Image (tube, grey):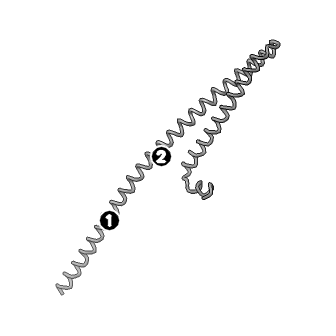
Amino acid sequence: MSSKGRLGDLTDREQDQLKMRRDSDTKAAELVKMEKMLQQTKGMFEKKAESSSETKNYEENMEDLEERVRSSRRFRRNSLHHTQMLESEMKTVKVELVGTLDHLQELRNVLRRSQQKAEERKVAMEKLAAGLR
C-alpha cells in the first residue's frame, strides 16, 4: 500500500496530528542543528581572542543563537503538549461516538420491535374484522 493510500484513509484530524508530529520532528532536528552551531560558535569564541569588536560580535551571535535555541525548545514543548491534548480529545470523541452508536443500535432495536408489534396488531385487527363480517 502506498503512503498516499494510507494518508487517504486518515481523517483530517489524524492527518493534522501526523503533520504536527512531522513538524515537531523537523523542529527537533533544527534544534539539534542550532545547538551544534551554538557549540561551534562558543568553540570559535573561546579559541579566538581577537579584537573587542569581533568579540562583541561573537557574543551577540552567541546570545542570538541561545535565544533561538530557547525559542525552539519552547515551540517544540508547546507543539508536543498541543498534540497530546488533541490525541486526548480524539480518544474522548471516539468513546462518545461508540456510546452514541450503541444507543442508536438500541433505538433501532426498539423501533423494529414496535413495528413488529404494530404489524401483529394490524393482522389481529384484520382477523377480528373478518370474523365480525
**x and y percent of residue 101 in the render?**
39, 56
- Picture quarter containing residue 133? bottom left
Indicate left or right for 117 with 54 as reference.
Answer: left
Q: Residue at x 62, y 57 (%)?
A: 2
Q: Identify residue for label 1.
A: 111
Vertical side of 110 occupied by 24: above or below: above
Residue 42 placement (x, y as % from top left):
72, 20
**First in residue order: circle 1 vs circle 2:** 2
Above or below: residue 58 compared with residue 24 = above
Q: On the picture, is 133 further left or further right than 113?
A: left
Residues 11 and 40: in front is 40
Where disc 1 sits, the SS reads helix
Residue lying farthest to the left in this orientation: 132
* Disc 2: which residue: 90
In the image, residue 113 above or below residue 123: above
* Residue depicted at 63% across the width and 31% down the height: 72
